[in-house]
Image (spheres, grey):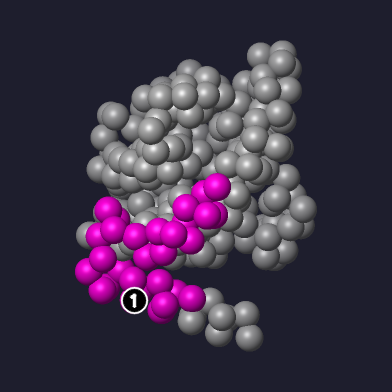
Amino acid sequence: MKLKKYIILIFSTMFFISSGIKASEECFEKTSRAVFKFNMAFDNAIMEPVAKGYNKLPQSIKNGTSNFTSNVATLLSIPNHLAQGNLKEAGDATASFLINTTIGIVGFTNPAERLGLKAQKEDVGQTLGSYGVGTGCYFVLPILGPTTARDSIGMIADSFVDPFAHITWREKELIGISGSQLDYLAVKGTTAIDFRADNDVNFESLEKSSVDLYASFKSLYLQDRENKISNSSDSNDDWGNLDK
C-alpha cells in the first residue's frame, strides 16, 4: 500500500514537470502563500527562539554539531556523485566520510577538510537537474519549506538512496548498523536548527528589507538550487546552504 502511494505521488509530480510549467510559475500560489505564512509563524514561535539559544552555546559545540550533521549528509552525496558520473567527487566524499567518522570522532571534527577533502553536497533533485530534468512548478510545503516539482520527487527518492535514511527512517539494517525514525528526526531537526542559527542575521535582514518576503524566499531558493546543480562558485556565499 505504501509503495502504491509513492508511485501515485511520483507520477502526479512528474505530470507537473512534463506539463511545461516553469519554476517561475506556481502550481498553487495562493495555497503556497498561506503555507508560507504558517511556516513564518512556526519560525517566529519556535525556530527563531531555539536558534538564538543555540547561538549562545560555545563555538566548539556549534562547530562539532555542524560537522556531525554535515558528515551524515555526505552519505547521500556519494551515490548521487556516482549517478552523475563524478567519480573523483564520489571518491573524495567517501574518503571524507571515512576519515571524519573514524579519526574525526563520528564526524564531530573535520580532519578531512584539513587534508583538502571537501565533500560537496548532492541530492537526487540535483542529480535529476544535471540530467536536464526541468524544475517544474514552485510551491511551499508545511515546515519543509520551498520546493519544486522536481525537488519534491528528489526528496522522496532521497529516502531510498540515502544510507542514513535507510537504517533510520526505514529502520533497515545495513552492514550490521541499524537505527530508528527518532534518530532520523533528531539529526534532521538539529540540521535545521544549525542552519537557522547560522543564518539568523540574514533572516532578520531579509525580513526588514523585503517588500514581498514570499517572493524573496522563492528567488533565493531557486537561485540556490540552480547554483548547486551547475556547481557554481556562487553556491558558497552566505546563503549557499539554503537547503543544508
Q: Quadrant of residue 124?
A: bottom left
Secondary structure that dominates the magenta span:
helix
Query: In the figure, is residue 226 to the left or right of 238?
Result: left
Query: In the figure, is residue 108 to the left or right of 162?
Result: right
Mark 1 crowd level (few <14, some 14–19, many ≥20, 10 Å Cα): some
Residue at point 63%, 61% (across, down): 166
Residue named by callout 1: 15
In front: 53, or 68?
53
Residue at point 69%, 51% (across, down): 184
Does the magenta-highlighted stretch encompass residue 29? yes
Residue at point 27%, 73% (across, down): 18
Does the magenta-highlighted stretch encompass residue 107? no
In front: 185, or 29?
29
The count of marks equals: 1
Tell me the quarter of the image containing the N terminus.
Answer: bottom right
The disc labelled 1 sits on which kind of residue?
Phe
Which segment is the magenta one?
A: 9-37
